[in-house]
């Protein structure tokens, strides 16, 4: 499975035990194996690696069966049931979450599973750190089951985050100047997921080479963080706090356009998740999201109705047009949007 070079590759080989008998790879090097242990605390990279493996397997065989198992609420016999060949022998991908919180029953059956993995099955075990499940991890790392380990350690240094962002643009075939890359990483040094989202947003909106001027237009003065602060406060119903954060962002020179984009990103994800049923992994696969995005959207949906979300989606379109020239007062349009979102879709000015 071909994959681009990316940040974290060097760390991966030193983060796990040096004595391990299986390959220890970075997130971008994930490849099919009967057992794939995805370890480390960086959930964003782990989710992306697992999604990349799924996409590769689907490209190899569209009949791939995908099943999700939660190790902390495991039902006896569940693992073997979903991994065993079906009547037509389709390949199977089994994604197991919460291995660091696994039940004793799962631990016993998973260790037994390693002795003879079913043919055509790919078992992905996500372990977020800690000592729980150590016996299983030791067995995998010893070579039992013929597995590989994908080590997703947190990217703490700015240089590592810069390598990650540079790989995002290179993979998409887009150019970004070194100055723009430094400015972008400086604006998102605290959250890798938001850094990745900012890279995607820039590539979607900027048609040519991305320069420092482009980054400053969208994210100058840590604008993206400010924008999401406004969105988070409004979605949670904290109207006063959201208005204060909005005014601070605008006073610091923030452009209203990317502020509306931050709202749109969160509200659209909430709209997708609101009507979906199933586990986080299943919903994430359905909508092309990461499981952490689904979990966050579910938390954000507390207190919202479908009608409220629909009203806000409509108003987002109106506000987006307003801040791009359709309104004589884009700041007023933004403040009204904040009020409607904080009221869960109710426009108090119409009462």
Image: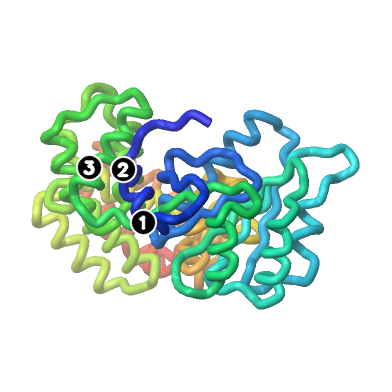
Mark seen at residue 85: none
Image-quadrant location for residue 19 = bottom left
Decide which of tag 3 and tag 1 comes sooner along the chain: 1
Residue shown at 73% from the left, 51% from the top: 117
- For the image, the number of numbered tags is 3
Q: Position of residue 86 (x, y in %)?
A: 86, 45
The x and y percentages for residue 281 are: 60, 55
Say whether disc 1 or disc 2 marks the residue closer to the N-terminus: 2
The quadrant in which residue 107 appears is: bottom right
Q: For marks 3 and 1, give the CA distance.
A: 20 Å
Circles 3, 2 touching at the beta carbon (< 8 Å):
yes
Residue 162, disc: 3
Q: Relative to the observer, which residue lies in front, 298 or 185?
A: 185
- Identify the residue shown where x is 35% and y is 32%: 204
Above or below residue 207? Residue 52 is: below
Kindly state the secondary structure of the residue where label 2 is placed: loop
- The residue that mark 2 highlights is 7
Which numbered disc, 1 or 2, marks the residue closer to the eye? Answer: 1
Left or right relative to 275: residue 63: right
What percent of the width, then of the height, locates residue 255? 18, 45
Q: Give the class, few, some or many, for how many residues have Cα within 10 Å of label 3's Cα (few <14, many ≥20).
A: many
Give the side of residue 281 with respect to residue 299, left or right: right
**Residue 268 visible at all:** no
Dot 3 falls on a residue whose secondary structure is helix
Q: What secondary structure is found at the residue carrying circle 1?
A: helix
In this picture, is 105 found above or below 330? below
Residue 15: image tag: 1
Kindly report which numbered mark, 3 or 1, lies closer to the viewer in this rendering: 1
């Amino acid at each position: 499975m071909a994959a681009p070079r990316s940040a974290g590759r060097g760390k991966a080989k030193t983060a796990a035990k040096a004595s391990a008998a299986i390959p220890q790879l970075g997130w971008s090097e994930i490849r099919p194996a009967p057992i794939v242990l995805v370890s480390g605390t960086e959930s964003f990279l782990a989710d992306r690696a697992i999604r990349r493996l799924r996409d590769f397997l689907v490209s190899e065989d569209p009949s791939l069966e995908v099943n999700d198992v939660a190790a902390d609420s495991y039902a006896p016999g569940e693992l073997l049931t979903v991994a065993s060949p079906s009547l037509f022998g389709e390949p199977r991908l089994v994604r197991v979450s919460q291995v660091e919180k696994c039940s004793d029953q799962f631990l016993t059956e998973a260790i037994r599973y390693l002795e003879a993995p079913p043919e055509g099955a790919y078992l992905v075990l996500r372990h977020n750190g800690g000592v729980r499940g150590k016996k299983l991890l030791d067995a995998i790392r010893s070579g039992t089951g013929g597995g590989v380990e994908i080590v997703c350690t947190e990217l703490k240094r700015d240089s590592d985050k810069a390598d990650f962002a540079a790989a995002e643009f290179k993979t998409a075939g887009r150019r970004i100047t070194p100055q723009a890359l430094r400015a972008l990483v400086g604006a998102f040094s605290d959250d890798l997921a938001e850094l990745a989202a900012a890279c995607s947003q820039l590539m979607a909106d900027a048609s040519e080479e991305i320069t420092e001027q482009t980054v400053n237009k969208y994210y100058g003065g840590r604008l993206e963080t400010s924008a999401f602060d406004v969105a988070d406060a409004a979605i949670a119903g904290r109207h006063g706090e959201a208005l204060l954060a909005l005014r601070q962002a605008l006073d610091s020179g923030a452009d209203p356009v990317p502020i509306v984009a931050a709202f749109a990103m969160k509200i659209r994800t909430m709209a997708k998740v609101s009507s979906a049923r199933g586990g986080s992994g299943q919903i994430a696969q359905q909508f092309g999201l990461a499981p952490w995005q689904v979990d966050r959207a579910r938390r954000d949906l507390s207190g919202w109705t479908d009608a409220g979300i629909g009203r806000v989606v409509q108003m987002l379109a109106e506000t987006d047009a307003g801040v791009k020239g359709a309104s004589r007062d884009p700041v007023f349009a933004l403040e009204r949007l904040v009020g409607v979102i904080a009221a869960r879709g109710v426009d108090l000015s119409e009462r």
